[in-house]
Each structure stands twice: as structure tokens, then as C-alpha cells.
Image: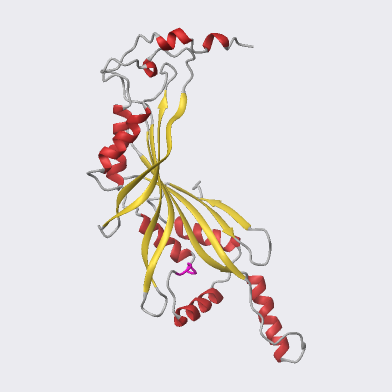
Amino acid sequence: MKNIEALRNKRDDIINCDVKDSTGLNDFQKTKNELPIMIPKVGIERFRIPLNFEHADGTLMSHDTEASMFVLIEGHKTGANMSRFCNILQEQSSTDPINHDFFKTILRRYRTELRDYEDEPLIPEAYLKLKFNYPVKQPSLKSGNWGWQYYECEWEGIEGKDGNPLMQLTLKYEYSSTCPCSLSMAKQYEEEYRAGKTTEGSGIASAHSQRSIATVTVTYSPDSDVTIEKLIELLRVALPTETQSLVKRIDEQAFAILNGDNPMFVEHASRRISHVLNDVEEFLDWEAKVDHVESLHSHNAVAYIRKEKKA
């Protein structure tokens, strides 16, 4: 077994640090690393900050955000200057809205400004992930009202040595799923009751349905025209039974009709998503988890699916 004792930081080495920062304070983070192993991601998670997001219509809205920020640390480096992550994010967001250009600027600044010295090469990789709830106006189905529908989002940018950043957007989309099997048996019972074949019950049976969640991640270039709103619209096409934010009775009836027109297992829902997303050229890759929180069972029905790879 390798002697780990020799790798432990000695008290005298820490106290008598021979590397100083610009103010003369000991800068142990810049001292020689005794164990030259590369670390893919070093940084900060759960840094809370209010950020102004640029919505698709050009309006700016402030959203409470959790930021995760990382860089790759090469084997000859001891570590990263953690406070710089926060300072850069706060400084840039004080003047710029959150959009694709913001991600490109931040990622390049991380690769540049988290270096120990200005004459060093750029840091090989940088990451920024923002987690937030994104509100979009949702029109009611029939009444002419509208309400705010909130979408749980994670937006991540990655830039490597080639200098070409990639974006990933993860969005949770909530919808109602009516069980096709339950619907079929409910209608079978009602027909048999009307025909006098059974006297059980009252002649009315209800198919079981439940709130369901599609968690979708798309990968794309920041130079494309992909927006959060665009992904939402695509999912509304694939799964039109989205949960509603504001309803009157006429909307509730319309929602019942919509559910009856779109019964689905998780298999149906995941294939609907695939059918819609595979046609979007801007999506370099995508994957989805479909989760039906069963009202009949005490367990969930789940499906995973991803972009079809062309031969």
C-alpha cells in the first residue's frame, strides 16, 4: 500500500507558506501539489442568487436561483479559488441578463480568471449550472382566463479546450395521464349496465388518472434559437393534457374531454415525446424520464427514453 503519510499537509508547511497573494497573506491554494491527479470538476454548489432571466418575448424577470460552478483542475494544480466563482457570477449578472450570451461570457471568464497566473494556458473546462423555477403565462382551455405555470428548470453550460460551449436544458413538465386500460373497462361496464348485463354500482364508472411528470433534457449549441418556451411548446404538442394553473367550470369540463381524448401509459407518453423531439434539428441530443404517479397503485410507473441515433 502506498504511504499516504508523506502526502499529508505538514503543520510547518501550512504556517510557513512561501506563496503570498497581492496583499501579502499566505496563499496555500497556489502551493505545489504533492499528488498530481486531475480532478474533473471542482467548485461550488447551491450558491443562491437572484438573477434576471431574459424570456422569449424579451421581458426580464428576476428568479431566485441556485448556481453550481466548476472548473477542471489539472494534476499539477492544488485547487481552485472558490470566491472567484461567486464574484464573477455576481459581477456579470449585475449588468447582463441570463441568456445564451451570458453563459458564453461566464464560461470563458471562469477558464481565464480562475488561473493562478495570467501567463498560464486557459483552464481546460468550465461549467455553470443554474437551477430555478421559470414562470410562463398559460391560457385557460376555454374561459379566456390565464395563470402562471411554473416549470422547474436546470440550465447548464459547458466549455472545453475547443472553446465551443454546449448547453443543456432540463425541464419538468407536469401533465395528467388517464389509464387506457381503466378507461376501456369503465366504458365496458357502463355499456353492460345499460344493457342490463350487470346491476353492480350506479352505471357510472370513472377511469383512473394521475398527475404525471416528464423530465426532459435537451443538448444544443448556444448559437441556436432554442428557448425554454420552445421546449414547453413542443411538450404541449406531445402531451396536451398539461396541468392547469387557473380553471373555471368550463375549463374543467374541457380538461376532462382532453384527458378522454389522450389516454396514455408511460409507454405512450415517452413515445409521443420521442416523436416530437426527434424532428428538432437544433437538439444535438435529448433524453427523458416519464413518471406516472399512479392513483390506482402505491408505486409509480416509469419509462426512460432518449434520442434515436441515426445509422
The picture quadrant where one finds residue 158 is: top left
- Residue 258 as seen in the image, left or right of residue 105: right
Report the front residue among 28 and 129.
28
The answer to whether residue 244 is above or below residue 199 is above
Residue under the image location 37 percent in, 72 percent down: 146
Residue 241 counted in the magenta span: yes
Report the front residue among 276 and 309.
276
One can see residue 200 in this view: yes
One can see residue 162 in this view: no
- Residue 48 as seen in the image, left or right of residue 104: right
The picture quadrant where one finds residue 139 is: bottom left
Residue, far left: 95
Q: Position of residue 188 (x, y in %)?
A: 69, 81
Count numbered badges in the picture.
0
Residue under the image location 32 percent in, 45 percent down: 222
The answer to whether residue 204 is above or below residue 162 is below
Overall secondary structure of the magenta section: loop
The answer to whether residue 52 is above or below residue 161 is below
Residue 250 counted in the magenta span: no
Q: Position of residue 204 (x, y in %)?
A: 66, 84
- Residue 297 as seen in the image, left or right of residue 178: right
Q: Position of residue 33 (x, y in %)?
A: 44, 14
Q: Position of residue 281 (x, y in %)?
A: 39, 52
Q: Which quadrant would the N terminus be assigned to in this image? A: top right
Q: How is the image coloured?
A: secondary structure
Magenta residues, start to end: 240-244
